[in-house]
Amino acid sequence: MSRIAGRQRYSSPVMQERRRRILAEARALLAEAGEPGFNIRELSRRAGVSSRTLYHAFGGRDGILGHAIAEHIEALREEWAANPLGGDIDSILAEYDTVAVEIERNSAYNRMLVALFFSVNPIRPALESIRSLPADRFGRWLDATPKRALLPRLDRERAIDRYVNGELSTYRYWASNRIALAALADELRINFLSNLLSITVGPLRTDIVRRYARLCAKHGRTENRHAI
């Protein structure tokens, strides 16, 4: 179930099927028309329900968008949970291959998510859903990392926020064709390692410096000397 509260609970099988159909059509319409082209009248026609039903069930356009995106994110979370990866560096770095496959598989929808996230009129529930996957990933690494390898008095939420913003900016570069799909996984790895450099100490940081330098060299990137 979506994490976003709706105005009406779908308890019966018939109502649950109606909800599934509405949100499936909402996701399809989003992928085709983007957020600016998403409208209640067209969704009502495609889902075979009245506009009044949509407003009653979801509280309006933003509510439908929030639910549709939250369900998409939850579906990804459940799919990836079937083959869970750990929180160590190697597991996280491998995870970006899975992310890149998803980006390619649902390219139009993911471009829409990026545009929605950076919209001048963002929909807050949608933003929270979009941020949740990268935030969970970085939080998993923090939980698996010994405290002695981290900066003392580390601000966990600020570190997560910084990482998430970097990852989403990387998707934005991809969506605007400034990063090729073939390079996306490594660009996400570079962002991850760059963020680790700013919060780690000791032997772990030395290992991260080596990994970061190798990836930068692979793509002809100049290393961020300030980060190192």
Image (cartoon, rainbow, N blue to C red):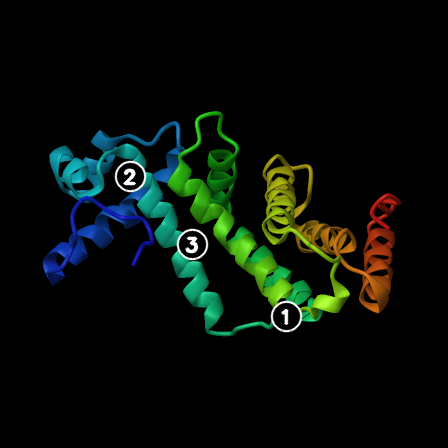
Q: Secondary structure at mark 3?
A: helix
Residue 103 place in picture, x, y as percent: 54, 51
| In this rendering, position of residue 32 left or right of residue 198 | left
Q: Is residue 38 left or right of residue 78?
A: left
The label shown at residue 93 is none
Q: How many neighbours does mark 1 have within 10 angstroms: few (below 14), some (14-19), or many (20 or more)?
A: few
Q: Earlier in the sequence, mark 1 or mark 2?
A: 2
Q: Going by the picture, which residue comes out furthest to the front?
A: 153
Q: Position of residue 43 (x, y in %)?
A: 24, 37
Q: Which image quadrant is residue 91 in?
A: bottom right
* Residue under label 3: 73
Q: Position of residue 215 (x, y in %)?
A: 81, 56
Name which residue lies at 47% across and 38% down: 112
- Are there few (<14), some (14-19), or many (20+) residues within 10 Å of tag 3? some
Q: On the image, which quarter does residue 139 sit in? A: bottom right
Which mark, by number, is residue 144? Answer: 1
Asked whether disc 2 touches disc 3, contact meaning CB atoms under 8 Å apart, the reply is no
Name the residue at 29% across, 50% down. 24
Q: Where residue 63 is drawn, which disc sits there?
A: 2
Indicate whether 207 appears above or below 49. Answer: below
Q: Quadrant of the N terminus?
A: bottom left
Question: Is 138 above or below relative to 116?
Answer: below
* Residue type at tag 1: Ala
Position of 70 compared to 51: left or right?
A: right
